[in-house]
Image (cartoon, helix red, strand yellow):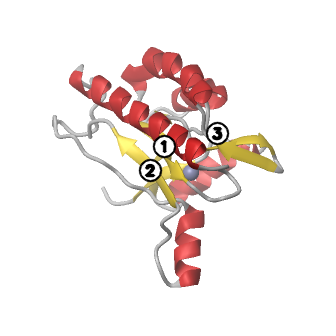
Amino acid sequence: MQGYVDCHCHISSKDFDKDLEEVVESSKQAGVLAILAVAEHAGEFEKIIELSQRFPGFIFPCLGVHPVQEVSPEQQRGASLQDLDAALPLIEKYKDQLVAIGEVGLDFTPRFVRGETDKDVQRKVLIRDLITLASINSQGKPHCLVSSNEFRLWCSFSGSACRRAAASGSSSRRQIHWLIAIVL
Ligand SMILES: [Zn+2]
């Protein structure tokens, strides 16, 4: 079977609420075999799990703490340890259903971080995400897409980073957003 896997999709965004069925159907018709639904914050984790249950075998859930958190449509900030505290219990709760920890990463874009302290917090959040990933891996992953115990790291650079790199002709060193697979 040939097709595409969208390994970085914010399908839980309210932007898709009105025509989700249509989006899923048109994706399938375009050759998309699976969508990995990535999270930004704990507030959407349940919705992502529900979407994976509503579209089994097509939408696969990934939970994580995005490096940039939205305060309002006009205001964003770097991820905090409180964001992580809210996320970890739900990641633990749903760990057997996850195909990845994501979206996670670092984003030091000046408007999101006020200084070195904010950068350190983002690093701590990312490290804790990675520890959580390692913990889940060490427990064995029952929902392997491929029968293998191999640990793989998927890097999925954000569209904004890609656009910036393309525009500037060089790679962005301020943004690294990852989707980290557990066991595939
Ligand atoms: Zn993203």
Q: Nearer the viewer, mark 3 or mark 2?
A: 2
Cα distance, mark 2 to mark 1? 5 Å
Mark 1, residue position? 104
Mark 3, residue position? 12
Mark 2, residue position? 178
* Percent position of residue 76, x then y: 73, 47
| Residue occupying the point 48% across, 66% down | 173
Q: Quadrant of residue 137?
A: top left
Can residue 175 be seen at all in this image of the molecule?
yes
In primary-sequence order, the first of circles 3 and 1 is 3
Residue occupying the far bottom of the picture: 169
In primary-sequence order, the first of circles 3 and 2 is 3
Cα distance, mark 3 to mark 1? 16 Å
- Left-right relation of 125 to 108: left
In primary-sequence order, the first of circles 2 and 1 is 1
Q: Nearer the viewer, residue 184 or 87?
A: 87
Cα distance, mark 3 to mark 2? 17 Å
Q: Residue 140, relative to residue 34: is it above or below?
A: above
Q: Nearer the viewer, residue 36 or 111?
A: 111
Q: Residue 149, relative to residue 108: is it above or below?
A: above
* Percent position of residue 181, x then y: 34, 41
Task: Say what secondary structure mark 3 lies in.
Answer: loop
| Residue occupying the point 62% across, 50% down | 115
Which amino acid, mark 3?
Ser
The image quadrant where one finds the N terminus is bottom left
